[in-house]
Amino acid sequence: MSAPDNLKNLLGLRPSSDILSNQIALLSSLVSTSDAAVPEVKSYPDAVYFNYFKLGLSLLFVPVNGYKPKTGLTKTDLSEDKLVLDNIDVYNNPVVTEKNSSKREFSSYPVSPLSITLPIDENNSSPTIFGVLPETTGREFVERLGEPDRKGGGQGPSSGSIGIWCEWSSHGVMVEFGGNEARGPQAWELGKDAVWKVISIFAPKLVN
């Protein structure tokens, strides 16, 4: 059993999937906390989150087949055969982090580099791998993934604005950036040097 080279391969799995369970167990073996494999569950009628704070990982499952989970269910109360993995959030701790004592913090994902598979295009006859390091910046994401299909954030005063984010819909990747460079009126000028904070992985979308 090895660490997942491509987290996209986990999309579509049920929470009880042996493949997914084995990967969580492997990641947990890389950290020192004994309960790292036990998620904090947040359930809603249209979404269920499994938050692994010590693993820097959040899994979003969506209900299928008409299932509508009640708010506030525990893991044992869920009908796991009616949930499929729709989105994966991987967390990083840049040098400068936004502290909020009332909010539980995610640790950094314990596998580095994080591998993102880039699809075949006119310049590549086979998929290539983008190895994302903890210090990978906005400039490097654009160099490897091209200009984003969607982007936002970075507005308002640096002390209270949302960090800039970029989405490469056709790759199934969205990146939120952290640190002072990612916030405030000059965020898009300085954001090239901002380090990633969260990478969201989902099924690629068609871009019009």
Image: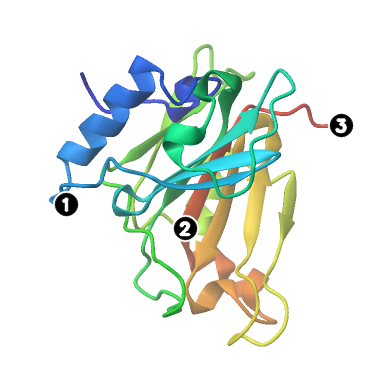
Give the mark nearest the N terminus, 1 or 3.
1
**Residue at x-position 24% and y-position 31%:** 25
Q: Secondary structure at mark 2?
A: strand
Say what amino acid the circle numbered 3 marks: Asn
Tell me residue 57's x, y (percent): 40, 46
The residue carrying mark 3 is 208
Q: How far apart in space, not on screen, are marks 1 and 2 (Cα)?
A: 24 Å
**Residue at x-position 57% and y-position 24%:** 84
Residue 88's place in the image compared with 122, above or below, is: below
* The disc label shown at residue 196, or none: 2
**Residue at x-position 72% and y-position 55%:** 151
Q: Secondary structure at mark 1?
A: loop
Tell me residue 183's x, y (percent): 60, 76
Q: Quadrant of residue 26?
A: top left
The residue carrying mark 1 is 33
Q: Is residue 112 left or right of residue 161?
A: left
**Residue at x-position 53% and y-position 43%:** 73
